[in-house]
Amino acid sequence: MIKRSLAMLLALSATALFGAPNCKPCPQACVERDPCDNSIFEGAYATADFIWWKTHIGSMDYALSGINDAGTNVPNFTNVGKGTVFRPDFEFKPGFKVGFGLDFTHDGWDLFAEYTWLNGGEHKNSFTAKEGVGAASSFNVVGPTGIVEIMSVQSGSSKWKQNFNVIDLMLGKSIPVCRYLTLKPSFGLKTAWIHEKFIIDYLPTTVQFASSGRLSAQQKRFQNMWGIGARFGLDGVWRFTRNWGIFGNLDATALWSDFHLKAKTTTLTEVIPGVPPAIATTNLNNAFSIQQIMAVIETGIGLTFMTCFCDDQYQFLFRAGWEEQVWLNFNHFVENIKSGDLSLHGLTLRTELVF
């Protein structure tokens, strides 16, 4: 009996010290870790987002109506009708985000990198001046005689396109504040490269420019920006059940930005009015650069769902929310009007796997 008891005691001691062969410790069940969040996982995680965002840039007005056009549509010394302002038609477009994170097992800190892509396609807009209302360019146009002036126009159109690329690299830590609230402060870097083109075509009024025989004028504007800066953020999740919750985030970046801009104006003029051929003349052709610190503010809010599976070794997360971004003093397309802000907003759907 004594020998048997000693043998059992030695076997139990060996199991405690070295573990059972071909077995690994069972993780603590998620149900005992209410709420189940990223702070209890160590390893890596990957994210994939579908975004449906609308881009808007301030101060992109290229023409306006409700103006005397030198008698073509509005006779001199008469009142004009109510007009409007013309700018590109900014629309919602699809894009995506992809990200990858790694937990260092160092006091719960993780490193996360995310790439955002949004190519909005070409946005077009056009107009025709109406009787009694008239129309004109919103800014000065350089003519073939070197005169810089607001151009009265019969019609006009615009094309605008943007390629939006951003990478965020953040170091953060999930901190359970209480049973149902988790906060994640983070800091790191944001880099962005954004390319845009803005092409405007005008058909001037025959009355104002009959002496020059001008047929059309085209403005071409190109803006290429690259920037990098420090980014700070705070994400929060409040759970009203074990799996469901509300999330919110606020991020701010001081982005050093390098803008490279090109501007070109071309007019098409008949040597003899009404008699072809017409001569194309480049009246403005310059390039310049601007360096500035640009503030970028990002917010988001929505619903989140989380669940654990495979003996709680993995976590799956789904989020549906609304995001907004503001890039202050972004627009430098037209040098003689005030700058405008770049804003993006729309729906974001995220899936995340923690493993």
Image (cartoon, rainbow, N blue to C red):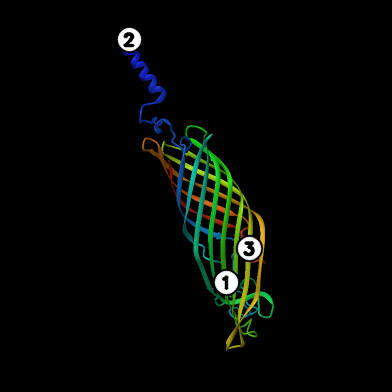
Q: Tell me residue 203's x, y (percent).
A: 57, 78
In the rendered structure, the answer to whether residue 228 lies left or right of residue 304 reads: right
Q: Amino acid at mark 1?
A: Ile
* Residue at the spot of label 2: 2
Q: Is residue 86 left or right of residue 315?
A: right
Tag 2, which secondary structure? helix
Residue 260: which disc? 3
Numbered label tally: 3
Instruction: Give the residue displayed 61% in from the left and 79% down from the top.
Output: 267
Residue 251 vertical placement versus 138 (above, below): above
The image position of residue 247, as x and y in percent, is 49, 43
In front: label 3 or label 2: 2
Label 3 to label 2, Cα distance in Å? 88 Å
Figure quadrant of the N terminus = top left
Residue 271 falls in which quadrant of the image? bottom right
Classify mark 1: helix, strand or loop: strand
Q: Amino acid at mark 3?
A: His
Q: How far across and how far down the image is residue 351, in percent? A: 43, 47
The alpha-carbon separation of the residues under discs 1 and 2 comes to 99 Å
- Disc assigned to residue 151: none
In front here: 282 or 238? 282
The answer to whether residue 66 is above or below residue 309 is: below
Q: Is residue 250 above or below residue 17?
A: below
**Pointer 1: what residue?**
200
Mark 3 / mark 1, whichever is N-terminal: 1
Give me the residue at 50% from left, 60% from top.
Answer: 119
Label 2 is placed on what type of residue? Ile
Question: Dot 2, how many residues are within 10 Å of its Cα: few (below 14), some (14-19), or many (20+)?
Answer: few
Other-residue count near label 1 (Cα within 10 Å), few / some / many at <14 / 14–19 / ≥20: many
Residue 151 image position (x, y, % from top left) = 63, 75
**Residue 84 seen:** no
